[in-house]
Amino acid sequence: MENVKSGLRGFSAMSARKKAIVVLAAVLFVVLFVVLCISINMRSNIQRQYAEARNKAGEALYSNLYILMQTFDMTSVPNTDVQNAILPQMRDYFIASVTLNSLITQTYGPRYTVLNEEDVNNLTAAFTSYEAAYRNGTPTDLAQSNMRVCMERVKELLNSRYSQGVLRAGR
């Protein structure tokens, strides 16, 4: 208590100019502290929004890849128009998946890539194989086998890259 009283006496004994400098320094310190707190809060809010956006894009990619697999399963249903109904739907989901994958990779970095270049090339080749078989009037067994391998890879990717529907960073 004595230290406080002596400090106050020392403050009152200062010239007006020195008092103004001390008060200004204290006010500046408080303002800087408030600005720091606001900046920290804004940064954490931005990081939260960034993670939410990444999760939403990851969920959309997961959904498109999952529906792509489910649609492929329809190729084994008897009397299904694979050429005019199933493959066009699959291609739409594939294009959406590649687009989302590219968006995620460009925005959040390669650690969040789900489909690598080889996966995209293999799926494209499987679609091309189907198109060639239909165009040439040949059986689609090889095309279906190639697509099945691709769908198994997609299933593997979904199981390894997602945890409870949330995209995890790769290595």
Image (spheres, rainbow, N blue to C red):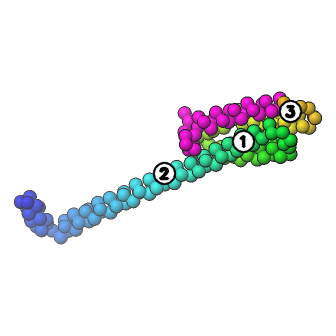
Please tell me which residue lies in front, 11 or 63: 63
Measured from the top left, where is residue 20 in percent x and y?
22, 68
The amino acid at mark 3 is Thr
Measured along the vertical axis of the image, is residue 15 above or below residue 81?
A: below
State which tag comes first along the sequence, 2 or 1. Answer: 2
The amino acid at mark 2 is Gln
| Neighbourhood count class around disc 2 (C-alpha, 10 Å): few under 14, some 14–19, many 20 upward | few
Please tell me which residue lies in front, 108 or 138: 138
| Neighbourhood count class around disc 1 (C-alpha, 10 Å): few under 14, some 14–19, many 20 upward | few
- Quadrant where the C terminus lies? top right
Q: Which mark is residue 140?
A: 3
State which tag comes first along the sequence, 1 or 3. Answer: 1
State how far apart marks 2 and 3 are (Cα).
Answer: 48 Å
Q: Which residue is mark 1?
A: 70
- Quadrant where the N terminus lies? bottom left
Q: Which mark is residue 47?
A: 2
Can residue 64 be spotted in the picture?
yes
Q: Which residues are magenta?
A: 142-171
State how far apart marks 1 and 3 are (Cα).
Answer: 19 Å
